[in-house]
Each structure stands twice: as structure tokens, then as C-alpha cells.
Image: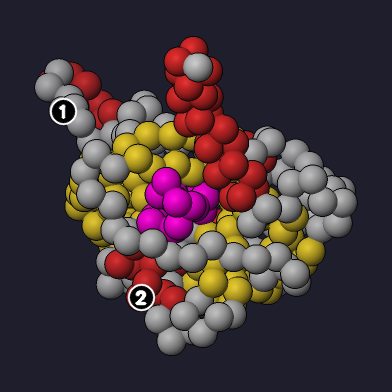
Amino acid sequence: MTSFIWCGALFAPLAYKVYLRDGLKAKVVYLTPENHSQKPDQGGGTGFHIIAPSGKVYIMTNRHVCNDAVDGKLWAVVEGKTSDHQVKVIYASDSFDLCLVEAIPGVGGLTVGDAPNAGDNIYYLGHPRLQQDTFVAGEAIGYHQLVVTMGVIGRTLKPEQCKSKDEYAIEETELQVLLNGFQSGHAAVTDVDLVQLIQKGPKVKVCYEKGQALVTTLMIYAGASGSPMVDSFGKLIGVVYAAPVTGGWGYGVTLADIKQILNGR
């Protein structure tokens, strides 16, 4: 009997993660500018169905995923389903990296949980590089004021996409932009010759966004933008949106920002 209980204790956490993953999988979607079934190699992101206070269901994702919408529309598909759905972008926030999109009919949504404390277990399910769903586990660390590169204006970003009160544009050399990405703000260049080389290069106008972020130990990969961060009960506590190029902590849109977007809907 003792052996049976011991084996069960080891199996229970694994079984629970499978249960949690399956519950998320039914609500998480690929989001792409064009029909994913016809063009599977395109870029895109992740989204998930969420229940608003009114009871209405929406797809929530990052605003920078919605920026790729064609004529205000994206294509959404739940993994394992045979049909893609063209869905309309309903609302893109000017203050947070969040966006609401039409839901796929008949798909249920996640409910909102409570803000996590340091050390709490936290999970996300997403589609990095638009591959099969990937389930990642980690812990919440705390909160941090984060500055994120939105893109180079005129090249990867339209001028009007850098306009909110939490965004600002500055001129930097292309080498500095590249270096900022690689060192992720954690190191300083001290070599005098290299500094001069960086400063003399051609300049571009770069858009940055700053705001409060949920800091986690989650590993975040390209394409996982817009994935739901959930607690051990499967309730939404954050939205994946940033990670250092060099790897490390994963950052999420905070629950307070999520609630502000859903308020009144």
C-alpha cells in the first residue's frame, strides 16, 4: 500500500499538468495575418479566449500581434481544428501591449484570477514560431519597470504605431539598436573605439515602450507573444509579451492592465 501511495504522489503533479495543458489548448489560438492553413510558414503570434465581466468572450493577444492585421482582420485557428476563422480586431490599447479580437464561435474562455505573489507557480501555453502548442512552467518573481523596443519607425513600424503616452521615439544609430537587443540593457560598452564607432554610424528613429511588467522565470520564445499566463487553477494572471534577446526572465502584461482593458466589456 505504501508503494502505491508513493507512486501516486509522483504521478499526480504530472497528471495535473496534462489536465491544465489540455484545458488551455482548447482556448488558445494561432493568430496570423493570412490563412494559416494556406500559408503555414508566415509570421504571427498567439492569442486566447477570455471571458469579459459582461460574460462575452473575446480573443486577447498583444497589440504588436494585432499590428500585423490586414484590413483590420487576422486569421485564428485552434490547434487540431480543421478550419481557420477570419476575425476582426475590435480594440487595440494605446497604453498597454494588449488587443481584443473577435472570438471563434463556440469556444469557451479563460476567467481572470488574482495577481500572483513572488514564488507562485505560473504557466503559459503558446505557439512559438507557430509550431505545436508549447507548455512552459515557472515561477513569478515580482514586478519591474520595463522598456521594450517596439521597432524602427518607417521600417518595421508605422509612425502612427508609436503614439501612446507610454511610448516615445528617439534617434539611435543602427549599431546601437542592434547592441541594445543583444545585451538587453544589462551591460555597458566601455571600449572607447567601439563607442565612437557606434556613435558615428547611420541613425534611425526607434520606438520604445515603457511600463510595469510581471517578471517570471518562464522561458519565452518568438511567436509566443500573446500567450496566456495562468496560475495552478488555470486562471489568467498575465499575458506573455517580452523577453531579453539573450534569454532569461520572461515578462508579462500585468493583471491590473488586463482588467483595465476588459473593464466595461
Q: Which badge, 2 or 1, is on the more N-terminal residue?
A: 1
Do residues under tags 2 and 1 come within 8 Å of each other at their CB atoms?
A: no
Amino acid bearing label 2: Gln
What is the secondary structure assignment of the residue under circle 1? loop
Q: Residue at x 74, y 55 (%)?
A: 77
Foreground residue, 262 or 55? 55
Give above or below for 265 relative to 226.
below
Amino acid bearing label 1: Ala
The question of residue 240 being in magenta is answered with yes
| Mark 2 neighbour density, 10 Å: few (under 14) some (14–19) many (20 or more) | few
The question of residue 213 being in magenta is answered with no
Q: Residue 188 shows which numbered tag?
A: 1
Any part of residue 239 in sight: no
Q: Where does the magenta region start and end?
A: 224-241
Q: Residue at x 33, y 49 (%)?
A: 148
Residue at the spot of label 2: 260
Q: Name the side, left or right, on which 77 lies relative to 185.
A: right
Give above or below for 162 relative to 226.
below
From mark 2 to mark 1, how far is it between C-alphas?
36 Å
